[in-house]
Amino acid sequence: MFSNCHDRPASPPHRHGCPGIRPTTASGIRPFCIHVTRMDGGRVVLAVTGAVDWANAGALRATALEEIAAGARKLVLDFSFLSFWDSSGMGAVASAYRSATDVGASVALAGLSPTLEKTYRLTGMDTVVPLHRDVCTALTA
């Protein structure tokens, strides 16, 4: 249906009532949102905005697991607009990874800010779930 990583459906589904990637609020923080883009070959991109913490890590986990159960073969978590994540968010990524590998699928991260990337690498998770500079690189890796 989509020929490359730049193709996007006309009206992709959104979770949690978000109308896509919204501008920052007056405080400079984007609200939590998961934007789902399904592509050919079982590729799925979950673009996450805002913060992934104890309050909404479950929503990220549930969305990732739903996409894997629906047949995603390559799940890319686009964290380009992520402002914060804690161990709950990293746990959601680990859960998605375990579920994906159980069915022969893969999970990758893309677009972490330098600060969040440092935290991710310190945990050692980058040796398990690969990190890419952008979504296109993650989709073609």
Image (cartoon, rainbow, N blue to C red):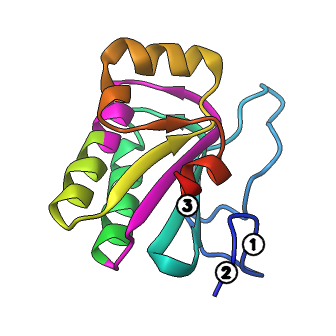
* Residue position marked by numbered label 1 in the rendering: 7
Residue 34: x and y, percent? Answer: 56, 56
Outermost residue on the front side: it is 141
Residue 102: x and y, percent? Answer: 15, 61
Name the foreground residue: 24 vs 85.
85
Q: Quadrant of residue 73?
A: bottom left
* Residue position marked by numbered label 3 in the rendering: 45
Contact between marks 2 and 1 (CB within 8 A): the answer is yes
Q: CA distance from mark 2 to mark 3?
A: 12 Å
Contact between marks 3 and 1 (CB within 8 A): the answer is no
Contact between marks 2 and 3 (CB within 8 A): the answer is no
* Residue position marked by numbered label 2 in the rendering: 2
Q: Is residue 54 visible?
A: no
Residue type at the position of mark 3 = Val
Residue 101: x and y, percent? Answer: 22, 56
Name the foreground residue: 113 vs 58.
113
Identify the secondary structure beneath mark 1. Answer: loop
**How dense is the environment of label 1, judged by Cα within 10 Å: few (below 14), some, or many (20 and up)?**
few
Q: Earlier in the sequence, mark 2 or mark 3?
A: 2
Read off the magenta span.
70-93
User: What residue is shown at x 53% (from left), y 21% (from top)?
Assistant: 117
**How dense is the environment of label 2, judged by Cα within 10 Å: few (below 14), some, or many (20 and up)?**
few
Residue type at the position of mark 1 = Asp
Name the foreground residue: 141 vs 126.
141
Residue type at the position of mark 2 = Phe
Name the foreground residue: 80 vs 139.
139
